[in-house]
Image (spheres, helix red, strand yellow):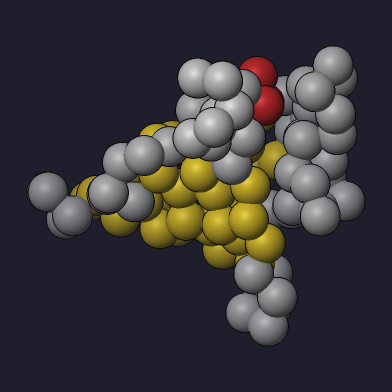
Amino acid sequence: MALIKSATHQEFDLSQIQRGDCIRVSRAGDTTAKNGFVTEAAANKLRLLYCNTQNNASSYLDLNAADVAIGVWEIYWTRDFQTVNYECNAPQIGDGV
């Protein structure tokens, strides 16, 4: 299921992701990822709590729906660890980019 409602309506589909869901995010094409939990879910923003391994502290990260819609972030999320969802709208090789 898509995390963003549509390309023209850049909002998170809150029936797909909710507060408390586990999430893994990385910038598209980057090899490092952040693992954490969704602490706030709004139509235009997700706030994530993750452990910053550089200084062993918890940190927050905000994901904007507009950035996700254009492919800035690669996202995996799950509610029950049975179904893992994936979202990345980054242009793929051969898409004319």
Q: Position of residue 75 (x, y in %)?
A: 55, 48
Position of the N terminus by quadrant: bottom right
Q: Nearer the viewer, residue 26 or 49?
A: 26
Figure quadrant of residue 79: bottom right
Q: Position of residue 17 (x, y in %)?
A: 74, 52
The residue at the point 11 percent across, 48 percent down is 55
The answer to whether 79 appears left or right of 61 in the picture is right
The answer to whether 66 appears left or right of 55 in the picture is right
The answer to whether 65 appears left or right of 30 in the picture is right
Q: Nearer the viewer, residue 81 or 54?
A: 81
The residue at the point 80 percent across, 23 percent down is 7
Question: Given the current orientation, which residue lies at the most extreme bottom position?
Answer: 82
Q: Is residue 48 shown to the viewer in this render? A: no
Q: Position of residue 46 (x, y in %)?
A: 62, 36
Figure quadrant of residue 59: top left
The answer to whether 60 appears left or right of 43 in the picture is left
Q: Position of residue 37 (x, y in %)?
A: 53, 57
